[in-house]
Image (tube, grey):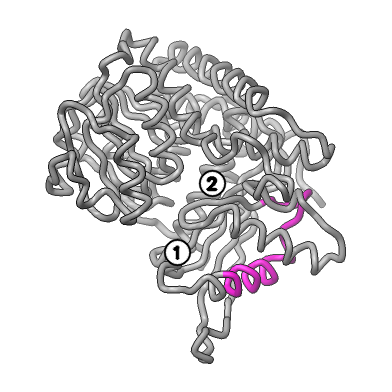
């Protein structure tokens, strides 16, 4: 039986996504007849990824690539390497990419990929082998006009370079546009590394202005200090905010007077995480959700904010840097408490927006400056958020439901106009 037809846990990523779709159906009018297509991924590929380890043994890993929708354009979405990757998780992440791309009106559908592996247990050469084998296995469905992967959890520009090279060797021509998030000298774009975090800041800045929250002196708590969390934290600090708590896979630290990122980031780079940072108090991981702050940025993995944690959060504004960090029950609890949530499908759309810029630049072989990239990014996100906010005000719904309403209208209008073939 296909996963599309089972009844997943409401707390699971796919279950959360299905409930989000159900909530938007009343606002779709005549397009609601097509809504069921949003609940079924177009294509799900499961592949075996065998590699020879450095010790001579052969290990097998399970890989996935899900294309949720290709109605508005090629699939677009990252590839993550994580020991907890599952098909259901990748389905949800692909579906959220469909919504995200439509919300900011990029000419993409949604896709996502992953390998169930702990990359920290692999050597650099083993990581290269697993990347190249995975790319070869999913090569039958990816391509610059079919599906364009990008970095995600535990993947980076080097992984994208290996993917691009493998695909290019298999098709017999250099295809820089097959992935985004590449190194600059292989067709990457300026501003890409910090783009997702910048998007969190830009949407957060606009939301703060709307609710009358002054960023100067605002306390900010950040979960996850990878590219997204660190970039967002840096920008909020530059705007006068105080980073009062940070959590990552090594632990949680807090300082009511504000953490000095100029000291913290070198420590994280040297030690692998925030644990052991001397200029802060180490607190229990669960206590992170009790830290008094104005802005909370969950920028780690999905499913972090359920109803219980949502009842404890003291922020005025939650900015979803991660994909799917809040369950439906958590979302309802935050709404009931009057805490504004800027949802992932618009809040962290900066990354895919600059990925789009990279893809366009690769086709034209003409590259923009970082200032041009940031100006274009800011303009797109500010305009998209205004449209979503107007929709929320008109229907008196949350920003998440409004984002889904805007996105689903675009997706299903395209679906209706394309019709069914054959």
In the image, farthest residue toward the top: 212
**Magenta stretch, residue numbers:** 128-148
SS under mark 2: helix
Displayed quadrant of residue 137: bottom right
Helix, strand or loop at label 1? It is loop
Counting other residues with Cα less than 10 Å from the Cα at mark 2, is it few (<14), some (14-19), or many (20 or more)? many
**Cα–Cα gap, marks 1 and 2:** 14 Å
Q: Is residue 142 magenta?
A: yes
For the point 27% across and 39% down, which residue is it?
329
Tell me the residue that label 1 is attached to: 86
Is residue 148 rendered to the left or right of residue 91? right
The crowding category of the residue bearing disc 1, from other C-alpha atoms within 10 Å (few below 14, some 14 to 19, many at least 20), is some
Residue 13 image offset from top left, x and y in percent: 40, 50
Judged left or right of residue 56, residue 270 is left
Q: Earlier in the sequence, mark 1 or mark 2?
A: 1
Q: Is residue 73 left or right of residue 21?
A: right
- The image shows residue 386, relative to residue 201, as above or below, that is above
Task: Give the total number of marks visible in the rendering.
Answer: 2
Whole-percent x, y for residue 22 in the image? 45, 38
Q: Is residue 313 magenta?
A: no
| Residue at x-position 52% and y-position 14% | 386
Furthest residue in direction bottom, as rendered:
56
User: Toward the viewer: 111 or 179?
Assistant: 179
Q: Residue at x 72, y 48 (%)?
A: 185
Residue that label 2 marks: 95
Residue 5, placed above or below residue 69: below
């Amino acid at each position: 039986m296909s996963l599309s037809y089972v009844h997943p846990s409401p707390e699971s990523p796919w279950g959360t996504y299905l409930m989000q779709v159900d909530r938007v159906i009343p606002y779709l009018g005549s397009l609601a007849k097509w809504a069921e297509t949003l609940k079924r991924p177009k294509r799900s590929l499961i592949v075996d990824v065998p590699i020879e380890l450095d010790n001579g043994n052969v290990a097998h890993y399970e890989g996935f690539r899900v294309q949720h929708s290709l109605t508005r354009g090629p699939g677009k979405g990252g590839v993550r390497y994580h020991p907890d990757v599952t098909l259901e998780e990748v389905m949800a992440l692909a579906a959220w990419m469909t919504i995200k791309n439509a919300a900011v009106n990029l000419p993409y559908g949604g896709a996502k990929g992953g390998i169930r592996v702990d990359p920290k247990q692999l050597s650099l050469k083993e990581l290269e082998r697993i990347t190249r084998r995975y790319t070869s296995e999913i090569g039958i469905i990816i391509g610059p006009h079919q599906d364009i992967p990008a970095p995600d959890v535990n993947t980076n520009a080097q992984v994208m370079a290996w993917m691009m090279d493998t695909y290019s060797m298999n098709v017999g021509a250099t295809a820089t546009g097959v992935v985004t998030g590449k190194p600059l000298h292989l067709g990457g774009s300026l501003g890409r590394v910090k783009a997702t975090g910048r998007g969190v800041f830009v949407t957060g800045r606009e939301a703060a202005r709307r609710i009358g929250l002054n960023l100067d002196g605002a306390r900010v708590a950040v979960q996850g200090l990878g590219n997204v969390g660190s970039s967002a934290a840096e920008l909020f600090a530059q705007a006068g905010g105080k980073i009062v708590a940070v959590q990552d896979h090594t632990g949680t630290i807090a300082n009511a007077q504000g953490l000095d990122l100029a000291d913290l980031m070198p420590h994280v780079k040297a030690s692998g995480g925030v644990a052991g940072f001397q200029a802060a108090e180490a607190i229990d991981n669960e206590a992170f959700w009790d830290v008094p702050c104005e802005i909370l940025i969950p920028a780690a993995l999905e499913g972090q904010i359920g109803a219980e944690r949502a009842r404890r959060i003291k922020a005025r504004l939650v900015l979803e840097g991660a994909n799917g960090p809040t369950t439906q029950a958590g979302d309802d609890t935050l709404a009931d408490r009057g805490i504004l949530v800027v949802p992932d499908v618009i809040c962290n759309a900066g990354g895919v927006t600059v990925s789009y810029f990279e893809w366009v630049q690769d086709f034209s072989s003409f590259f923009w400056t970082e200032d041009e990239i940031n100006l274009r990014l800011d303009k797109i996100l500010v305009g998209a958020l205004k449209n979503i906010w107007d929709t929320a005000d008109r229907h008196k719904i949350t920003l998440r439901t409004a984002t889904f309403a805007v996105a689903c209208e675009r997706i299903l209008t395209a679906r209706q106009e394309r019709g069914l073939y054959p």
